[in-house]
């Protein structure tokens, strides 16, 4: 039985390969790479940087001192948003090799992002220390949702914002495994959308927006699979992306992801929650 960190760390260090792949893109050779240049390779969630832009557009970034990305993976979304919004990022992840890669990629792109290797249910930060917390496609691996959202509420400043882009259990029952977030069922801890929203509200946060994105993810996954099949039929390699880094086993995981979406075994949601203002409890 592999741990969650073993599942994500199975490919070893990835930073050098990401920099090499991004450096081959049109217009990249001969100049320093930016966080945006890496976005096709280092954003490990459905719809990549499009979904990151979508949740980022739900809040006003002006004047924010910093933000926290929980379960930040290789740090792609954290670096991308730090660069795009001009706000320093802090990322936290359980997988040591991802944290090491996140730091290496921040150094390579001159990013204002730092990374800590920690469990999102026991954060190494003081109370009320972030005006904005976000998380994308990480809660699926975390069994203790009450502890996770208690920590989010604890580190959020009064009136702070919590952005979520996450995968949930659909109405048709358990997903087929392996999937990108879990090689084995014991690594996966999905809630239904209603249960997840209730768990976040139970931590004291108020839901300002809750949007089902399953149809958009399905369309994007189908378009990507069509493009890959067309490339193969024409004797070309499919375009490189985050999938290129995740070993031969990722093909079955990606196929199950598409099947789980089609069979309504998983859903995808974006959401915005707010922390109570100081002294109001609201
Ligand atoms: C599918 S990846 C998404 C990474 C990143 N959010 C992104 O969108 O690129 C899920 C990440 O959650 C991390 N993770 C899982 N359980 C965690 C926990 N308890 N605390 C911190 N990170 C965790 C994994 O190590 C992995 O990097």
Image (tube, grey):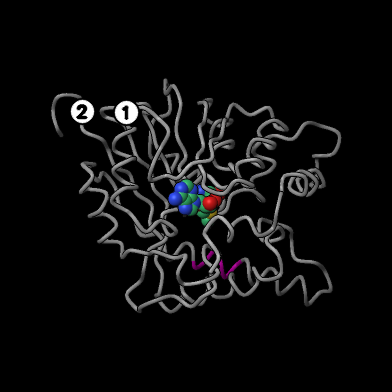
Q: Residues within 10 Å of mark 2 (few under 14, many from 20)?
A: few
Q: Which of the image's four quarters has the C terminus?
A: top left
Query: In percent of the image, x 44 and y 58: which residue is there?
Result: 141
Q: CA distance from mark 1 to mark 2?
A: 14 Å
Image side of residue 246 versus residue 66, left or right? right
Query: In percent of the image, x 53 and y 61: which residue is there?
Result: 3
Residue 88 at x, y percent in the picture: 52, 26
Label 2's element?
A: loop
Most extreme residue toward the right is: 30
Earlier in the chain: of badge 1 and badge 2, it is: 1
Magenta span of residues: 218-223
Q: Is residue 161 visible?
A: yes
Label 1's element?
A: loop
Q: Is residue 51 visible?
A: no
The residue lying toward the viewer, choosing from 268 and 101, is 101
Image side of residue 179 versus residue 201, left or right? right
The residue lying toward the viewer, choosing from 89 and 115, is 115
Image side of residue 69 versus residue 112, left or right? left
Magenta span includes 219 = yes
Which residue position holds label 1? 127
Residue 99 at x, y percent in the picture: 60, 42
Rendering quarter of residue 31: top right
Residue 268 at x, y percent in the picture: 41, 61
Magenta span includes 273 = no
Query: In percent of the image, x 73 and y 58: which residue is there?
Result: 240
Image side of residue 198 versus residue 136, left or right? left
Which residue position holds label 2? 277
């Amino acid at each position: 039985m592999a741990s969650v960190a073993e599942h994500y760390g199975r490919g070893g260090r990835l930073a050098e390969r990401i920099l090499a792949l991004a450096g081959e893109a049109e217009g990249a050779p001969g100049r320093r790479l930016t966080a945006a240049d890496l976005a096709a390779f280092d954003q490990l969630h459905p719809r990549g940087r499009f979904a990151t832009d979508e949740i980022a557009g739900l809040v006003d970034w002006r004047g924010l001192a910093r933000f926290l990305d929980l379960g930040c993976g290789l740090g792609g979304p954290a670096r991308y948003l730090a660069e795009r919004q001009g706000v320093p990022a802090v990322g936290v992840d359980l997988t040591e090799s991802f944290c090491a890669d996140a730091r290496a990629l921040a150094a390579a792109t001159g990013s204002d992002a730092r990374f800590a290797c920690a469990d999102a249910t026991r954060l190494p930060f003081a109370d009320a220390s972030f005006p904005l917390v976000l998380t994308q496609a990480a809660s699926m691996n975390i069994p203790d949702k009450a502890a996770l959202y208690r920590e989010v509420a604890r580190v959020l400043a009064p009136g702070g914002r919590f952005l979520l882009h996450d995968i949930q259990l659909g109405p048709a029952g358990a997903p087929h495994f392996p999937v990108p977030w879990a090689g084995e069922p014991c690594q996966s801890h999905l809630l239904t959308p209603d249960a997840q929203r209730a768990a976040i509200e139970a931590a004291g946060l108020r839901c300002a927006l809750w949007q089902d994105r399953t149809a958009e993810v399905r369309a994007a996954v189908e378009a990507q699979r069509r493009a890959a099949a067309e490339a193969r039929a024409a004797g070309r390699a499919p375009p490189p992306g985050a999938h290129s880094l995740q070993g031969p086993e990722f093909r079955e995981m990606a196929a199950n992801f598409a099947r789980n979406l089609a069979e309504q075994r998983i859903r995808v949601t974006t959401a915005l929650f707010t922390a109570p203002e100081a002294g109001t409890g609201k």
